[in-house]
Image (cartoon, rainbow, N blue to C red):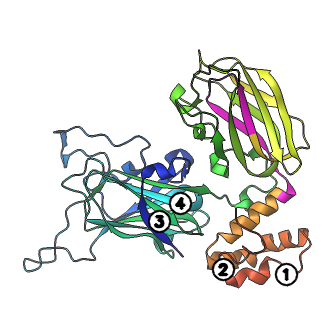
Amino acid sequence: MNSAEMVGQSSFGGMVDLASRALGAGVVATNEDTFADAENLLVAAPAAFRPHTFGHKGQIMDGWESRRRRGISAEQPHPTDEDHDWVIVRLGAAGLVRGVVVDTAHFTGNYPETASVQAASVPGHPSPAEVAAADWAEIVPRTALRGDTAHAFAVSDPVRYTHVRLNIWPDGGVARLRVYGEVLPDPRELAGLTFDLAAQEHGGVAEDASDRYYSSPHHLNAPGRAAVMGDGWETRRRRDTSHDWVRLALAGEGEVLAAEVDTSCFVANAPGWVELVGAGADGERALLPRTRLQPDTRHRYRLAEGTAVTHVRVNVYPDGGLARVRLVGRLTAAGEEALALRWFNALPEREAGEVAASDWWGARRSAVGRSPGTGVGAYACQGVGALAGEYPVS
């Protein structure tokens, strides 16, 4: 059952913003953005405001703002209760939505009265018309808004989505939209390929860290390169004899074939040494022994093949900062199978049925030795979660 409730924005601090432009998010369509462009909703930086700064359409606002709605006649000058504006956003990475933030920062006399958020799964590269015609599910019900406020909603929904639609009644402005959750990639796009197993866009997550005093460990597997030191992960200065670390969960069980440890922008505070330790079904194993690092440098290492891991711990000695960590490799057969089943469990019912009937899924079922009566096809018509008993979704 889908549900949403107001929470503190800090509840989503450890999650990926699925609507990040860095991941490839974009505005697909909007019905109205005369005062301020809908694309502003996805700007990474917090909204800014410069009072008494006017363009030819009025005060320049850092957000999305629609024109004032009017009724249909002099006798009916006000909009109806159903008149509203909307914007559709393609998520940069499809996944499970766990939280939404609708931020009306600096909109004080022109914010919407209420808002809701819907989501849809539209695979492939659909046109705006195809997205608009999709089956939309409500993940945040119509809720009253306040001006100059970040409204954070926790979302409980088992479905993997590719797009969201923000609806506002009757009109007004919203500064930023954030959609936090878990990236769940399409396994058909990764099967048999070599890629960065730790990358956010593929479902990698910085699960834990010894220290996040100056900046977040989630920067380590973010898209692109760090532009400044603040784009990386930096610890406080240690005054003991221990060391700092980050634990990365990979997209699935895989073999890490190469690593890149990037200290770009860390000139006087890079770690002295780094060590990579993999963890999997057979326990822990060193992938890269303790190795010297240079400041402001991209270090690349070839690693031994044959070690299947699900997590990698990045140990830095004694402390300091890293810009990025890349762990290039390939999923094992077990990793591909687990990802495929987790993805299938999260598909909307109709999409799950189409996948279960496809040649691709039939080939996978045959490859793992399942008969038609006991494999995925037997559950296809039951929709989302049908396999949860046999293959729990982590």
**6 displayed left or right of 237:** left
Number of residues whose C-alpha sits closer than 10 Å to that of mark 2, classed few (under 14), some (14–19) or many (20 or more) = some
Residue 8 spot, x, y in % from top left: 42, 53
Residue 69 spot, x, y in % from top left: 20, 67
Say the numbered circle drawn on residue 128: 3
Relative to residue 54, is residue 322 depicted above or below? above
Amino acid type, residue under disc 3 in the picture: Pro
Amino acid type, residue under disc 2 in the picture: Gly
Give whichever of discs 4 and 1 has the lower sequence position: 4
What residue is pinned by disc 2? 383
Say the numbered circle drawn on residue 98: 4
Say the numbered circle drawn on residue 54: none
Q: Is residue 32 magenta?
A: no
**104 displayed left or right of 372:** left
Amino acid type, residue under disc 1 in the picture: Thr
Main SS, magenta residues: strand
In this rendering, the label closer to the viewer, 4 or 2: 4
Instruction: Report if the CB atoms under discs 2 and 1 are less than 8 Å apart.
Output: no
Instruction: Report if the CB atoms under discs 4 and 2 are less than 8 Å apart.
Output: no
Q: CA distance from mark 4 to mark 2?
A: 20 Å
As drawn, which residue projects farthest toward the front? 240
Instruction: Report if the CB atoms under discs 2 and 3 are less than 8 Å apart.
Output: no
Q: CA distance from mark 4 to mark 3?
A: 25 Å
What residue is pinned by disc 1? 374
* Residue 228 visible in the displayed image: no
Under circle 2, the secondary element is: loop
Over which residues does the magenta segment extend?
Answer: 313-334
Instruction: Report if the CB atoms under discs 4 and 3 are less than 8 Å apart.
Output: no
In this rendering, the label closer to the viewer, 1 or 3: 1
